[in-house]
Image: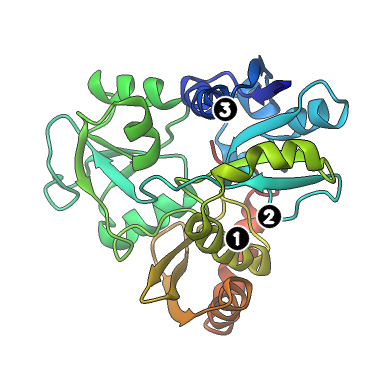
Amino acid sequence: MGRLRIGSRGSQLALWQANHIAGLLRQRGHQIEIEIIKTTGDKIIDVALSKVGTKGMFTKEIEEALAENRIDLAVHSLKDLPTELSADFEIAAIPAREDPRDVFCSVRYNSIAELPQGARMGTSSLRRQAQLKWTRPDLDIQPLRGNVDTRVRKLEEQEYDAIILAAAGLNRLGRIASIKEKLPPEIMCPAAGQGALAIEIRAGDATTAGYLNFMEDESARATTTCERALLNKLGGGCQVPIGALAELRNQALHLTAIVGHPSGAKIIRESATGTDPVKLGETVAEALLEAGALEILREVDNQTAPAPQQP
């Protein structure tokens, strides 16, 4: 087997993901090197993501390394990848998906419902903010940036009463002690692609694609394709207030999605069942638009820079 070079961001979670894929490939006899690549999103740490106007801010530099043949494959959190991939690249494999849900983390409180009036909640996601404000309009939502360890440390130092994080990152890093409540999509609809990894290669690289085939998970591919089709139809990235969760139920896909106003004043929710992932995603997106989602997205777009991707 040949030597393969994996490109990854340098955060603890990104490196866990890269090392996980490297381990699977080493089991098949490959020699693996991991190259850490600093992205635009890694350099901008003191500004809310919704205020930064760089599309693909966590993937651009990694894709450049792929295009220049400095790496052979890239391991991404799927929700970081723009829904419209350049024709120069392809997603060779989407491995089995981790828990896609968001979770409530706190030192002192066991649930969102248990938080006192005016509690300080940390998140920089407009999607999470919209749904939190819808459920608890009294909460004091404060920005929260940084990698998983940084966010958990800020919680433990009581800068916040509670924070919302993705279950997948905490599970992968073994940081589950702070999880107090797993949030159902009825309360907190997750980001499209959350919990899934994407292995990106140069388009037409059949040799590398062949090496990665064994990792492909049909369920993860179907559910995330559906969620990303919805996101693409709505014209949004993960930092706009859009949530989407597709699940396999009785041989069919069930998709639930929301568009929420960041103030929490309005949440539009639609769901449907189908067998074609792209068609289902687009159908639910159209239902959201007909119900008034376009007005919310236009207002958010006017208030922020073009939507970057969330780490």
Q: In this orientation, does residue 246 appear?
A: yes
Q: Do labels 3 and 1 touch, CB within 8 Å?
A: no
Callout 1 environment at 10 Å: few (<14), some (14 to 19), or many (20+)?
A: many
From this view, report whether residue 300 is shown above or below residue 19: below
Amino acid under disc 3: Arg
Instruction: State the separation of the CA atoms marked 3 and 1.
Output: 31 Å
To which residue does mark 1 refer?
228
Q: Which mark is residue 173?
A: none
Q: How is the image coloured?
A: rainbow
In this view, the residue in front, 15 or 262, is 15
From this view, report whether residue 283 is shown above or below residue 13: below
Q: Secondary structure at mark 1?
A: helix
| Residue at (52, 29) in percent of width and height | 24
From this view, report whether residue 191 is shown above or below residue 178: below
Residue 47: horizontal and vertical position, in percent? Answer: 58, 30
Which of discs 3 and 1 lies nearer the camera? The answer is 3
Amino acid under disc 1: Arg
For residue 119, which quarter of the picture?
A: top left
Amino acid under disc 2: Thr
In the rendered structure, the answer to whether residue 196 lies left or right of residue 182 reads right
In primary-sequence order, the first of circles 1 and 2 is 2
Q: Which mark is residue 83?
A: 2
In primary-sequence order, the first of circles 2 and 3 is 3
Q: Secondary structure at mark 3?
A: loop
Q: Do labels 1 and 2 touch, CB within 8 Å?
A: yes
In this view, the residue in front, 221 or 79, is 221
In the rendered structure, the answer to whether residue 72 lies left or right of residue 169 reads right
In the rendered structure, the answer to whether residue 247 lies left or right of residue 239 reads left
| Residue at (32, 54) in percent of width and height | 132
In this view, the residue in front, 232 or 19, is 19
Q: Which mark is residue 28?
A: 3
